[in-house]
Each structure stands twice: as C-alpha cells, then as structure tokens.
Image (cartoon, rainbow, N blue to C red):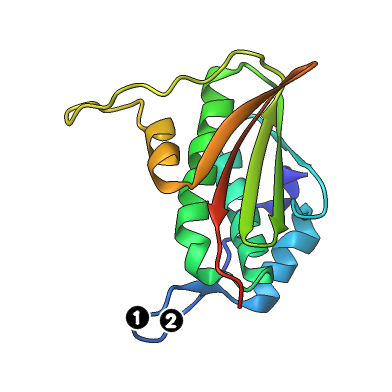
Amino acid sequence: MADRAGSEQPQRVAPAAGAQPVLAADTADAVLDLLADPSAGEVHLTSRPESASTARRLSLSVVRKWSLPQYADTVELLVSELVGNAVRHTGARTFGLRMQRRRGWIRVEVRDPSRALPCLLPVRDLDISGRGLFLVDKLSDRWGVDLQPRGKTTWFELRVSER
C-alpha cells in the first residue's frame, strides 16, 4: 500500500498567529483514501526507512480528521520514533500502524512480529542515538509494550481535552 503514495507530501495550511499548523482537510482525506486509515483498522507498511514518512502522513491525517491539530507535532514525532524502532531493530518485513480515539485519549500502536522488547536507556547530552523511547517516555502520558503470540505492539497514549 505504501508504494502508491509516491512522493506526494501533505500540504500544510498557514496557521494563524499562535496556532498549530494543520493539514488541509481535503489533503488529509486524500491521504487516508489513498493509503488507508489507521483509525479504521491496522495499516500494514513495508519495513523500510521511507515508511516513517508514510506513517507520519497517515497519523497527521487522522489527527486532522479528529480535529485535534494541537497534538499534531507530538503525534508526528512519537510515531516517527516507534516506526523507526520497528524498522531498525526488528528485522521485520512489515509493521502495522493503528490509531484509536476514546474519550479523553489518543492511542497510537505500532505492531511488529518481533518479541524482543524495546529498552528505555538513560540518555546523556552527547549521545547521538538511543533517544527514541526517551522522547516517547517524556512526551506521552502513557506508553508500553504488549506481547502478542506473534510479535508485540508498542504504543503510546496522549490525554486530549474534549470540547
């Protein structure tokens, strides 16, 4: 599925002063129509570095669909970190991306076929790698790993304010 995206980039609408940038509604819908909607079910992506970009576009489109643009930057960064870990450390051919919204929460899941658990390592100022889970730990309200019969699901949750 990810191969159909080509090199298209989602368009950002210029935000008002102090507002967060958001995807244009029609672009967000187009991305979800073209690739698949991770809020409707798990989206399978090829395990390669370019898929992080696709996962970011999908997650931004869902956040836009949910009218929660103030969470876009955090979701985008944390999706990149979880996808990066799945691509670099699992040796898997594919991974799955899923997003859920329930009252007061956004949950993002990345599923891969490896049962190796990710490690939250201490981070020092001069470290050039190993910051992914540190960022997930600091920026999310909750995160964890659920072992599955064949693999694992690494997830994070953000508390969202209801209107």
Quadrant hosting residue 73: bottom left
Q: Which residue is mark 2?
A: 15
Quadrant hosting residue 34: bottom right
Q: Residue at x 38, y 42 (%)?
A: 138
* SS class, disc 1: loop
Q: Is residue 52 left or right of residue 42?
A: left
Relative image position of residue 95 (x, y in whole percent): 70, 31
Q: Is residue 33 left or right of residue 118?
A: right
The kind of residue on which mark 1 rests is Gly
Mark linked to residue 149: none
Q: Is residue 119 left or right of residue 91?
A: left
> In the rendered image, which quarter contains the N terminus?
top right
**120 vs 57, nearest the viewer:** 120
Q: Residue at x 62, y 61 (%)?
A: 104
Mark linked to residue 18: 1
Using the image, determine if residue 74 lies above or below residue 43: below
Q: Residue furthest bottom?
A: 16
Relative image position of residue 7 (x, y in whole percent): 60, 54
Relative image position of residue 24 (x, y in whole percent): 60, 77
* SS class, disc 2: loop
Q: Residue at x 46, y 48 (%)?
A: 77
| Separation (CA) of disc 2 from disc 1 | 8 Å
Quadrant hosting residue 29: bottom right
